[in-house]
Every structure is written in C-alpha cells, then in structure tokens.
Image (cartoon, rainbow, N blue to C red):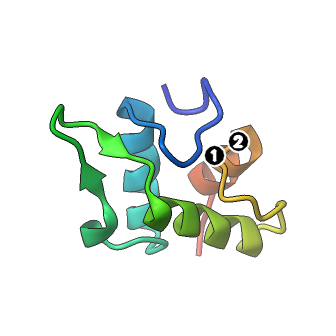
C-alpha cells in the first residue's frame, strides 16, 4: 500500500494512484494532471512531482518531489 516504498518520478502502481488521489483531494494537482498508462496504472509524472513539492513546502519538509514516509504521512494528515 501507500507508504510501503518511496515513490518518485517514473514509479507506477496502486500506491501512486492513492498518492495522486490524495494530492487531487487537497487541490495540489488537478484531475487532468493524472496520467494512466496502457495497463491502467497511474504514472508518477511531473504534475505529481510538483504536487508533492507543494505539500512538502507547506509542511516544512525537504522539497524533493519524492514521496517518502514523512511526506505521505503529512499528506494523509493534511487539513487545510
């Protein structure tokens, strides 16, 4: 599930889909930013990188664009 691995640009999988959903839910990305490959997996694209950087900036985490455990926890607990 989400948080089992560190996610970064180029990753695909169910965990990326959940990450994208959370980013969209909190308006860090738009629905149109979510790219799905031929197999139906969400791709960790530039829009997701930028969305992750936004949550990292707001929560004072290192701004890497990489969804590590701290970033995922911050996103899960995010309340604007």
Query: In the rendered view, does 32 fall on the left or right side of 22?
Result: left
For label 1, count other residues whose C-alpha is less than 10 Å away and answer few (under 14), some (14-19) or many (20+). Answer: many
User: Circle 2 — which element?
Assistant: loop
Question: In the figure, is residue 49 to the left or right of 44?
Answer: right
Question: Which of the 4 quarters of the picture holds residue 52?
Answer: bottom right
Residue at image x 45%, y 49%?
44
- Is residue 17 placed above or below 53 in the rendered structure? above
Q: Position of residue 25 (x, y in %)?
A: 39, 64
Q: Residue 57's mark?
A: none
Q: Nearer the viewer, residue 59 or 16?
A: 16
Q: Is residue 64 above or below residue 15?
A: below
* Mark 2 nearby-residue class (10 Å; few <14, some 14–19, many ≥20): some
Which quadrant holds residue 75? bottom right
Name the spot of residue 51 as percent of width and height, x first: 54, 67
* Tag 1 secondary structure: helix
Q: Residue at x 48, y 38 (%)?
A: 11
Residue 20 at x, y = what percent?
41, 53
Task: List x then y, in percent, for residue 66.
Answer: 66, 50
Q: Which mark is residue 72?
A: 1
> Any mark on residue 68, and which?
2
- The CA span between labels 2 and 1 is 6 Å
Name the residue rendered at 15%, 38% in the picture.
38
Mark 2 vs mark 1: give the one in front: 2
**Are the residues tagged 2 and 1 within 8 Å (C-beta)?**
yes
């Amino acid at each position: 599930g989400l948080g089992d691995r560190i996610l970064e640009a180029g990753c695909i999988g169910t965990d990326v889909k959940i990450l994208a959903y959370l980013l969209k839910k909190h308006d860090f990305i738009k629905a149109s930013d979510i790219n799905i490959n031929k197999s139906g997996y969400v791709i960790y694209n530039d829009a997701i990188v930028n969305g992750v950087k936004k949550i990292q900036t707001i929560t004072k985490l290192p701004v890497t664009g990489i969804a590590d455990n701290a970033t995922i926890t911050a996103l899960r607990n995010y309340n604007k």
